[in-house]
Amino acid sequence: MIKTQLTEKLGLRVPLVMGGMQWVGTPQLAVKVTNAGALGLVTALTQPTPEDLKKALIEAQKQVYPDIAAERKDKFGSLGVNITLLPAITPPDYPAYARAALDAGIRIFETAGNNPGPVIKILKDAGAFVIHKCTTVQHGLKAASLGADMLSIDGFECAGHPGEQDIGGLVLLALAAEKISIPFIASGGIANGRGLAAALVLGAQGANMGTRFMATAEAEVHDNIKNVMVEKSETNTIHILRSFRNTARVYRSPLTEEVVEMEKRGAAIDEILPLVSGKRGKQVYETGDPNLGVWTTGVSIGLIHDIPTVREIVTRIEREAEEYLQKGSALVVPKSRL
């Protein structure tokens, strides 16, 4: 068993967190992750309204195994909620989503995106535990000053929004260990036990995984999309919206390559928005057509070779990480034996 500040503070058996994934981070999947011994996060905006989120969370918590619920009760509860604040013409009412989750009894939150201060304040005033996801050490230091309890350090390999500085996880995590005083977990490019073990050696207290949990039996994603993830490699992602400083790593398709070409020609955002709409992205998961819309995946797609159950992948990563950490310690021998 691997013991870290993440497992100790949140009552986990395995130091893994299910990343926030729009349309994929459903209550049903989050419950499966929690029941496997990790931390399941419900992505708030998978629900149409704050009231819908509250109802979904109340129902989801009833599905958590009683022994897990009891074990974590004295900490911060059994499920968490992701609230990602992104640029939008008409932004969602993020504070309302935060309050709805709090009203449902949730006390673990992952925040991400722009200006999280007001939302973090609401959460901390209610006694919640806040993990803030960030892509630079500078943003991590700011989040710590705003009251975040832990950080999720998101390297360039990640799905979704990697920021604009293009710093890979190997360097970013080492920098975080040097410069940030509060604990952090690693995010981006992790899909197996090797990745978790490496993150722990670099100073992380665990790992955040999105892409790997998306390719599981219980994820509410069309089977064809999961099969595509198994078939494709680490080269099958692409960055879009870079010209608007809202870079997103997504699946490489004729559609997303067209978006990049439009950006190169100087297309305005109004021309591009119809192609990258969330509605089209949701239809990808519903219809199984990977080219219908934009959907996110990290370079860890190259490490996905099967579609296991959530419990199988959590158990496998736990076992592999323990093995690799033990092998690593065996490399250190007394100098007298040299």
Image: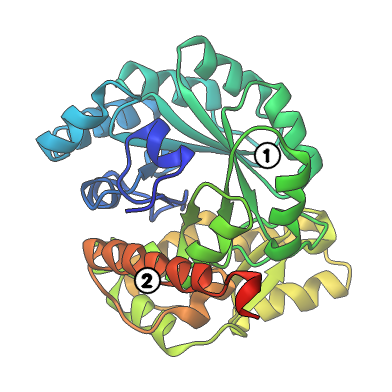
Q: Is residue 278 left or right of residue 167?
A: left
Q: How is the image coloured?
A: rainbow
Please say whether residue 19 is visible from this viewpoint.
yes
Q: Which residue is mark 1?
A: 89
Which badge, 2 or 1, is on the more N-terminal residue?
1
Dot 1 surroundings within 10 Å: few (below 14), some, or many (20 or more)? few
Q: What residue is at 57 percent from the left and 68 percent from the top? A: 189
Given the current orientation, which residue lies at the most extreme top position?
Answer: 125
Alpha-carbon span between mark 2 and mark 1: 44 Å
Please say whether residue 214 is visible from this viewpoint.
no
Which amino acid is tagged 2?
Answer: Glu
Residue 162, located in which quarter of the rendered image? Answer: bottom right
Q: Which one is nearer the viewer's eye here, 132 or 225? A: 132
Q: Which one is nearer the viewer's eye here, 301 or 90? A: 301
Q: Which mark is residue 267?
A: none
Q: Which mark is residue 320?
A: 2
Q: Position of residue 179 (x, y in %)?
A: 78, 41
Q: Position of residue 153 (x, y in %)?
A: 64, 49
Q: Is residue 281 left or right of residue 162?
A: left
Q: Which one is nearer the viewer's eye here, 152 or 74? A: 74
Secondary structure beneath label 1: loop
Q: Position of residue 248 (x, y in %)?
A: 67, 61
Q: Is residue 88 above or below residue 323?
A: above
Of circles 2 and 1, the one toward us is: 2
Which amino acid is tagged 1?
Answer: Ile
